[in-house]
Image (cartoon, grey):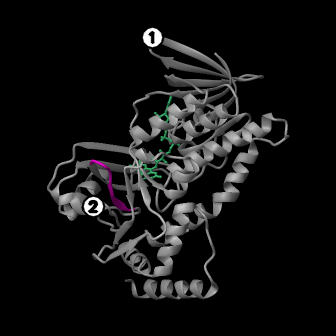
Amino acid sequence: MNVDVAVVGGGPAGASAANELAKKGLSTILIERNLNNAKPCGGAIPLGLIEEFEIPDFLVERKVTHMAVRSPKGRLVTMSMPNGFVGMVRRERFDKFLRERAAQNGAVLLEGKFRTIKETDSNYRLLIDVKGGTEEVQAKYVIGADGANSKVALDLAFPPNEFKAVAIQQRFHLCEELARYENLVEIWYDGEVSPDFYAWVFPKADHIAIGTGTEDGKANIKHLQARFIEKLGIQAKPYYEEAAKIPMHPRKRFVKGNAMLVGDAAGLVTPSNGEGIFFAMKSGKMAAETLVDHLKGKGSPLSKYEKNFRKQFGIIFTGLGLMQSIYYRNDRLRESFVAILEDQHVQQISFDSYLYKKMVPAPLWVQLKITAKNLYHLAIGK
Ligand SMILES: Cc1cc2nc3c(=O)[nH]c(=O)nc-3n(C[C@H](O)[C@H](O)[C@H](O)COP(=O)(O)OP(=O)(O)OC[C@H]3O[C@@H](n4cnc5c(N)ncnc54)[C@H](O)[C@@H]3O)c2cc1C
């Protein structure tokens, strides 16, 4: 099969890229190894994503307006979002919808496992293992959207995905003892349940998802999860368990020749909160738009995608990276961090930047007040 673009991986990044390319009339193939895939994921998405990518209401199982953050010593800071909500989706439904939308707009959807890619003088040759044999695809451009362990990136010798965390999540049926979480996201900063990240409770339509994360190889993730369930005091048993790696650091480079990496394959998950769905979809869309401009003879190189992405979101990655490296180091610092979150302005800035990924500078007096509070809480350790 000959196409303009081969997109490998049908998660949010690949499906968004394929959708955009197909809409603009490029012949596009979207290759996904398992069309019933359920990517291990909390499925929390910001309002800005729902609006920009026109996510229909039936996919957003919960619109959570309340959040509680808990410190190692048990200080609980509760907040509500007056101007928005955190949307909760289930990835098995969400990803399927995005892929099908891309197909409706003209992308060819192929179920098969991408095996290898070779660059020739004029194009890329991809081999795909499909039911009953091997499919060869020839493409002028390739988009690697095959997740944190991207084989496309490996075959095309991109710089490695550097920092990989690992996260686990268990699903519990909604029941009386979990009813308190129906409209509440709860986040725990506590070294016993995560020595360098956080643990979470997310509500879905028919279940509560509970999970934790840590830097890969640093601690036993199963033990951390067991301790979290124990500390939450939950007696119910999970009916489903899922785990996967999270890259949390952009690769040194994610455009090479006529190939681009998007989403987890490019390492586009923010430190500190592990958010990746928005950045996957946004990077997929930006890569596709750059490619369309490039082909329309506007002379824009593909590297513009990477440049624009870093320009728009680099500050968020840097800011959140700094926050994680300062506050997630030990329980004393985590205690200070949660104390700072009690400030209304800190809450407002956090929600605004999460919901729409825009860093709006606060007035000078607010910045000074927050700095003073930071220093105070860091000094007293609570
Ligand atoms: C436990 C956990 C909880 C998380 N919670 C959240 C959250 O609440 N909110 C949030 O924003 N982010 C969360 N993340 C991060 C988020 O899941 C990812 O950042 C996001 O899925 C990235 O999307 P993607 O399309 O780049 O990659 P993926 O979703 O990983 O999609 C890659 C796709 O490629 C396919 N694929 C892989 N290899 C091949 C191959 N060889 N051939 C064909 N297809 C292939 C896979 O089947 C998959 O469908 C979480 C991650 C984990 C592990």
Q: Which x, y percent locates residue 373?
A: 48, 86
Q: Is residue 161 visible?
A: no
User: Tag 2, which secondary structure?
Assistant: helix
Q: Residue at x 41, y 76 (%)?
A: 333
Q: Amino acid at mark 1?
A: Gly
Q: Which residue is mark 2?
A: 181
Quadrant of the drawing holding the C terminus: bottom left
The region drawn magenta spans 198-206
Amino acid at dot 2 = Tyr
Compute the Cα span from label 1 to label 2.
Answer: 46 Å
Residue 44, horizontal then vertical, whole percent: 42, 54
- How dense is the environment of label 2, judged by Cα within 10 Å: few (below 14), some, or many (20 and up)? many
* Mark with earlier residue (1, 2): 1
- Which residue is at the far front? 57
Residue lying at 55% horizontally and 36% vertically, measured from the top left: 15
Per the image, the residue denoted by label 1 is 132
Q: Which mark is residue 301?
A: none
- Rendering coords of residue 188 (x, y %): 33, 66
* Residue 124, above or below 216: above
Residue 234 as seen in the image, left or right of residue 246: left
The quadrant in which residue 362 appears is: bottom right
Q: Nearer the viewer, residue 250 or 51?
A: 51
Q: Indicate whether residue 138 is drawn in magenta.
A: no
Left or right of 74 on screen, residue 252: right
Find out whether the residues at labels 1 and 2 contact each other: C-beta distance under 8 Å. Answer: no
